[in-house]
Image (spheres, rainbow, N blue to C red):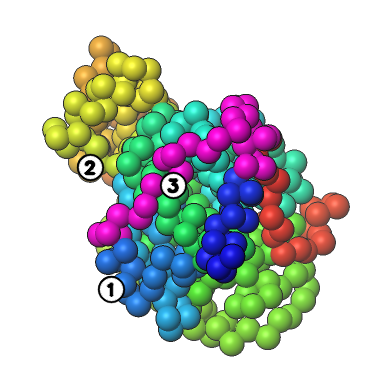
Amino acid sequence: MALPTLRGAFFILALTGLVACSSENRSTISARAYTPIPQETLSAMASIGSDRNAPILIRAYKKESEIEVWKRTSAGQYALMKTYPVCRWSGQLGPKTREGDRQVPEGFYTVTPGQMNPNSALWLSFNVGYPNVMERSLGRNGGDIMVHGTCSSRGCFAMTNEQMEEIYAVMREAFQGGQKSIQFQAYPFRMTAENLAKFRNDPNMPFWKNLKEGSDRFEVTKREPAVGYCGARYTFGSSDAPSCNETVADPDAAAVAAKARDDDARVASLIASGVGPKRMSYADGDQNIIFRDPAKKKILEKWAAAGEFSRPEALNAVRELTLDHKGNVVAESSETVTAYVAAPKPLIQSITLGAAQPGSSPDNTVDTAKADDSFFTKWFGTSTPVDNTESGFTAPATVPFPPRRG
């Protein structure tokens, strides 16, 4: 038997093992799991010096509602192959911590062939691997967090069926090409200076700053970062992730640190120029703005009528709010996204520009000096640092393969 055929056979065996653990338990694999990669996508691979068998890496962003698929090139670095708009995700910005919170997780995860589900009730799917080893050590629970089709989310990234067929096919070919596992990076938003300045007063900022360390390393090296953990923090390295109180030779450290310094300077400049703190307000997640295009409206309405498009009315409640230095709402941003679905009534109280909100200061002018104090304290670490040596969780580890879908 030829080598590619053997690889394909082993991959199908892995998928069959997953089906045996799933609720559908069918003896045959759905034909949609064999959908070929579109020629346009194969051309995109060739244009960056890659091919269907090369390893991939996936990055997901909640606020922008996008998933990126990166391919390793012949030069050994990753290049962006394609960006897919997310049809639906649920919850709020911030990490997932427990079963039933409807949160899409944020962090670094591992996807193996056994986490691919060809017979998913949601067209096709793969399990992202939440909770990872660090999250389990912190007592976080929940599971079956997927990227899947059908555009309906209860804590997952939901795509259209056509998108899911393509992403699934790209992953399938990478596994058949010999990739053992795929790194899945999930972020609240793109780790730009603009976003960091806007959301500087969010209580999740210390955690997001930690995620940015991994994001920076990938941006600088274009190689998959090694991921470990120490207490409640991820650790990153160019080959072996460092552990608690351990020094690892890292030839990329200087370049990564330089990027971090440049971003910090850009954040400080934006704040000094008057960029006020923001907060996103969701009733239950969001979707990419492309799906509000009139051309997509009928498609989503059809899914909604069939009960497969989750909570379309919640999209009307997506707001970007401007805060004062105390965290009180000053106004609704002019950048607020309006959903195409007409809700019968507002899901949150409308906010008049410039009007005082309950519990806010009578003076609605943002005090940038005070905002700066709050931000610099959290971002540049001048306050008491986060305790990352929780009892029982000080032992570092390279993140192992997560449990399979059960």
- The answer to whether the residues at label 3 and label 2 have Cβ atoms under 8 Å apart is no
Residue 202 disc label: none
Residue 290 disc label: 2
Residue span colored magenta: 16-41
266 over 152 or under it: above or below: below
Q: How many residues crowd around disc 3 within 10 Å: few (fewer than 14), some, or many (20 or more)?
A: few
Q: Quadrant of residue 70?
A: bottom left
Residue at position x 26%, y 17% from top?
343
Residue 60 place in picture, x, y as percent: 44, 52
Pointer 3 residue:
34
User: Would residue 258 be seen by someone viewing this image from the given angle?
Assistant: no
383 over 92 or under it: above or below: below
Q: Quadrant of residue 117?
A: top right
Residue at position x 72%, y 52% from top?
133
| Residue 90 among magenta residues | no
Circle nearer the viewer, 3 or 2: 3
Q: How many residues crowd around disc 2 within 10 Å: few (fewer than 14), some, or many (20 or more)?
A: some
Locate residue 338 relative to residue 209 in the image: left or right: left
- Distance from disc 1 to disc 3, alpha carbons, whole Å, reads 24 Å
Q: Amino acid at mark 3?
A: Tyr
Residue 187 place in picture, x, y as percent: 47, 52
- Distance from disc 1 to disc 2, alpha carbons, whole Å, reads 25 Å
Circle nearer the viewer, 1 or 3: 3
Q: Quadrant of residue 312?
A: top left
Residue 192 place in picture, x, y as percent: 37, 62
- The answer to whether the residues at label 1 and label 3 have Cβ atoms under 8 Å apart is no
